[in-house]
Each structure stands twice: as C-alpha cells, then as structure tokens.
Image (spheres, helix red, strand yellow):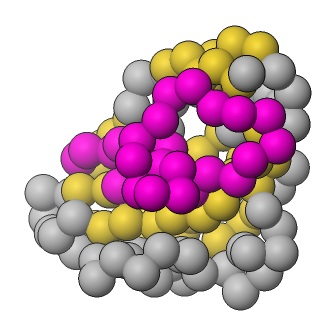
Amino acid sequence: MTLARDLLDDNGESVSKLKLGETYRLVVRVQADKPVSRFAVQDILPAGFEPDLEALKDRRSVGNEANAWNCEQVDVRDDRVLLFGDLSATPMVFSYPVKPTVRGSFVWPGLYGEAMYDPRTYGWEKASTVTVE
C-alpha cells in the first residue's frame, strides 16, 4: 500500500513554498497491491490551512485525472479531509483545493489510510514541512 500527497500550483507544478492567500491543488495518491474494499484515508492539514469548502460541496475530486478516485464518502472538516471507498489495484487520485491563511513554517502530518474492517491493510506517508510566505 502506498500513499502520497503533493501540492500543485496553477501550472500543475509541485510546490513546497507557498504564497499566503493563494489557492493550491492538493493531490492524494493511493496505490494498492490488490483491490481493497472500504478503505479510509485521513488527510490532516497543517495549521493555518483550510480546504475550499465550496469546491468540495459535491464531495468529488476536483481534478480531471483519468484515474480519479470516486469515493463513496468524503468528510470535509476544518482541519482535515477524510476519504472512504473501495480501491482497485491501479493508482487512484483524489484532489481538492486548499488555501494557506497564515505565514510560517508548518509540520504537515503524514497521510494515513487503512481498510476499515482489516487493520492489517494500511499505509502511510511520513510527515513533512511546508512554508508559507
């Protein structure tokens, strides 16, 4: 199981230093070795970030990737986005817009995911840092 996350600017380029008030596309990638039913991913946002609630009102990935993960449930909170659904053995992507609202350097907790009824099936991405100028 592989989980990865990336922040993209308007040009689709990966960024690690962000500008205050600009919107970025957060891309969550999930790759399972085999099909997994009822998988949950927890994406905790760093302090000073907020998901774009208007863009997520339909609870669907905002990207136009061919391998978009059509989650059964998307739970959007102030500080995190929770994704629930079945995985195939092909890479799947869920993306949504986020906006930094405070300047500084922040620890970004790692992604975590596991099969809801089989805790032996799980994956994570380690924590990272992000800087907002």
Q: Where is residue 42 in the image (x, y as percent from the top left)?
A: 58, 48
Q: Which of 42 and 7 is in front in this view?
A: 7
Residue at the spot x=15%, y=69% of the render? 89
Is 85 placed above or below 98 here?
below
Q: In which quarter of the image is residue 81?
A: bottom right
* Quadrant of the snapshot with the C terminus: top right
Residue situated furthest top in the rendering = 105
Q: Does the magenta stretch include residue 11?
A: yes
Q: What stretch is highlighted in magenta?
A: 1-29
- Residue 107 appearing in the image: yes
Q: Where is residue 26 in the image (x, y as percent from the top left)?
A: 54, 52
Give the side of residue 102 with respect to residue 92, left or right: right
Q: Quadrant of residue 5?
A: top left
Q: Where is residue 33 in the image (x, y as percent from the top left)?
A: 12, 57
Residue at the spot x=86%, y=49% of the render? 78
Q: Does the magenta stretch include residue 109?
A: no
Residue at the spot x=25%, y=44% of the render? 2
Residue at the spot x=69%, y=13% of the render? 105
Give the side of residue 106 with respect to residue 68, left or right: right
Give the side of residue 107 with respect to residue 48, left or right: left
